[in-house]
Image (cartoon, rainbow, N blue to C red):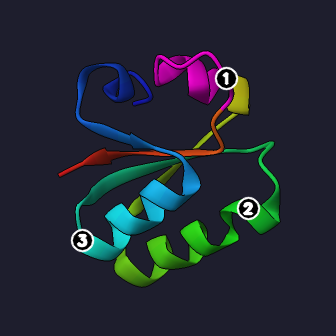
Amino acid sequence: MIESLRDGNITVGVKQTIKTIEKGAAKVVFIARDADERVVGKVIELCKKDNVQVVYVDTMKLLGKACNIDVGAAVACTLK
């Protein structure tokens, strides 16, 4: 499933992902398990509220790599 980040239209980062969820454009949200709860808490709440699928990734480093960026990422999402 994480492979979809390499191919598709994505958003990376907490602020951008929140905006995408609020617009109703998020298909699947990926959250790193080692991300700080204070950082990703609002994203998790919005996903539950809007019934957006959440997939957990082991580390921020792995999620960043899947998004083709050189740093870790706490959150990313694919677009509808």
Q: Which residue is mark 2?
A: 39
Label 1 and label 3: CA atoms lie apart by 27 Å
Image x and y of residue 74, in percent: 65, 44
Q: Is residue 33 above or below residue 38?
A: above
Q: Where 43 sits versus 68, above or below?
A: below
Q: Tell me the quarter of the image containing the N terminus.
A: top left
User: Which residue is disc 3 drawn over?
Assistant: 24
Disc 1 is placed on an element classified as loop
Horizontal arrangement in the rendering, residue 33 relative to residue 18 (left or right): right
Distance in Å between CA atoms under marks 2 and 3:
21 Å
Q: Nearer the viewer, residue 13 or 44?
A: 13
Q: Is residue 9 magenta?
A: no
User: Is tag 2's residue or tag 3's residue first in the polypeptide sequence?
Assistant: 3
User: Amino acid under label 2?
Assistant: Val
Q: Amino acid at mark 3?
A: Gly
| Residue 31 rendering spot, x and y as whole percentages | 60, 48
Q: Residues within 10 Å of mark 1 (few under 14, many from 20)?
A: few
Q: Which residue is at the front of the view, 16 or 50?
A: 16
Q: Residues within 10 Å of mark 2 (few under 14, many from 20)?
A: few
* Residue range of the region highlighted in magenta in the rendering: 62-72
Q: Categorize mark 3 by other alpha carbons within 10 Å: few (<14), some (14-19), many (20+).
A: few
* For the residues bearing labels 1 and 3, Cβ distance under 8 angstroms: no
Which residue lies at the image location 34% right of the left edge and 75% below the top edge? 22
Task: Identify the secondary structure beneath mark 3.
Answer: loop
Relative to 43, is 74 on the left or the right?
right
| Residue designated by label 1 | 71
